[in-house]
Image: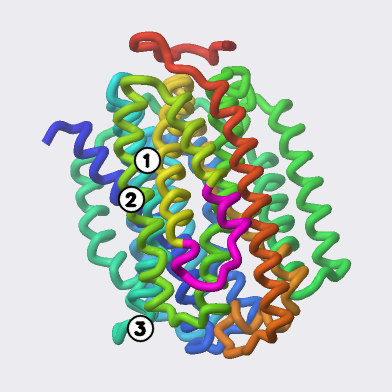
Amino acid sequence: MDYKYVVLTNTTIGAFMAILDANIVLIALPIISADLHASPFEAVWIIMGYILVNAALLLTFGRLSDIFGRARLYNLGFALFTVGSALCSISFNGISLVVFRLVQGTGGALIFSNAAALLTDVFPPTERGRALGFNQVAGTFGSVSGLALGGILAGSFLGWRSIFWINIPIGTIATFWAYFKLKETSEPRRSEKLDPIGNILFGTGLTVSLVGLMLGALLGWTPTFVGAIVIGILCIAGFVLAETKVRYPMMDLSLFKIRAFAAGMASNLLASLARGGFSLVLVFYFQGVLLFDAFTAGLMLIPFSVSFVTFGPLSGYLSDKYGSRGLATAGLLIVAVALFWLGLLPFQNYNQIVVPMIIAGAGGGMFVAPNVASIMNATPAARRGVASGMSSTLINTGFLLSLGLAFAIMATSVPVDVLQHIFSGGSVSITPVQLDSFVSSLHGLFLLMGFISLFAAVPAFMTKKPKGNYEILGSAEVD
């Protein structure tokens, strides 16, 4: 096999698995919480812990890969992710699962922060959109299919632990394969240093603000949670300021001088913010309103997943020939139409929402591949590690913000104790009045996400196709 396809195959498996496990526990959480007797607080961290550690470490690992080599850190990530998955499968209570998920999330961050950079190093610009698109679509498909797979496995006779078993054989094979086959194609910049102040400010700000937002929605808006959000925002502001002062920043803000890079990153963040809460809302609707079990709810999400993965690779192929702007913009507009449609439906049965679900999946698949290709094509070769980490960080940050936003909006119409019981696996009945309020909150949330997707189409339209084999090899070029 040509080496570039070895890289593509291995990193695609890695991206799929790493993002799959961000969502695979979401639909199985009621079963997990009931079996492990997890509190609502622990239930939140079973999901949030993985995504938070992933988002907080991506930039750091992106910088480390530029300094020490991408293949080496990527391989370490696969090994750590596999070990973390095995530990998750033997969890004995809620706290142990939270800790093991943090281990798993650290491995996932190492995988995902290096995958796009490894691919960009070995594929020429004329093939890069297809390769990156295939990889990114596989990863995002992991996030949407994780819901279906998690529900099917957790609801089967295998039980919820099986959602982690599937990672062990695949992860073991892929780890050894990466160790023996992947080679370092970048030039490590060992003279550069890490950015400890930036690491502390970013990790603290992201964690504290998002935990405050999530727990405030779930447990009530106490001064502690509101204060946490304020402190987190101040830390993020301090991080942005600090990055302009250090010689070797963990987030290279100078890259935002490149129009294609900046526009791609902006649309990336907004698109993730628009779609992140989509899955959570549907899970609550299927299990909390339609009273589906996890297995049935997983099956109901398959049309969305299939639609996404069908249009993703095709969009990546077309972006190599015709550029990313039209495809990425059209994808976001299609998603916006689907979300507006969902925002106007009565939500009385599944048949009413399946068509807009399919349309939303198609639009999301169309957007992802051209977007990541435009970002990585505009990045200097020596900065691809940090650029890959920045892109992945924005995806995870948008996803987390979207989850927090969804919880906050639902908490305005559904009593907090009812929301807690649904989220942590308790059996609870919703009164007709509460049901009407819940559906109203769904309408508001989908309409809001539709407007965000519409707004995301603006920066997506500002990107442009590079001319010929255009590639930035030196310092960032200002467009």
Q: Earlier in the sequence, mark 3 or mark 1?
A: 1
Percent position of residue 194, x then y: 58, 36
Does 279 appear in magenta? no
The amino acid type found where label 2 is placed reads: Gly
Q: Which corner quadrant of the image does residue 382 belong to?
A: top left
Q: Disc 3 marks which residue?
A: 159
Can the viewer see residue 398?
Answer: no
Does 351 appear in magenta? yes
Could you tell me how many numbered marks the image carries? 3
Can the viewer see residue 414?
Answer: yes
Q: Are marks 3 and 1 in contact (CB under 8 Å)?
A: no
Q: Which corner quadrant of the image does residue 202 belong to?
A: top right
Percent position of residue 150, x then y: 39, 71
The amino acid type found where label 1 is placed reads: Ala
Q: Which corner quadrant of the image does residue 446 belong to?
A: bottom right
Q: Are marks 1 and 2 in contact (CB under 8 Å)?
A: yes
- Residue, far left: 1
- Residue 98 higher or lower than 366, as above or below: below
Q: Quadrant of the C terminus?
A: top right
Name the residue rendered at 35%, 68% in the picture: 149
Q: Disc 2 marks which residue?
A: 14
Q: Earlier in the sequence, mark 1 or mark 2?
A: 2
Spatial separation of the CA atoms under disc 3 and disc 2: 24 Å
Question: Which segment is the magenta one?
Answer: 338-353
Spatial separation of the CA atoms under disc 3 and disc 1: 31 Å
Name the residue rendered at 69%, 41% in the picture: 197
Percent position of residue 109, x then y: 47, 50
Query: Is residue 177 shown left or right of residue 162?
Result: left
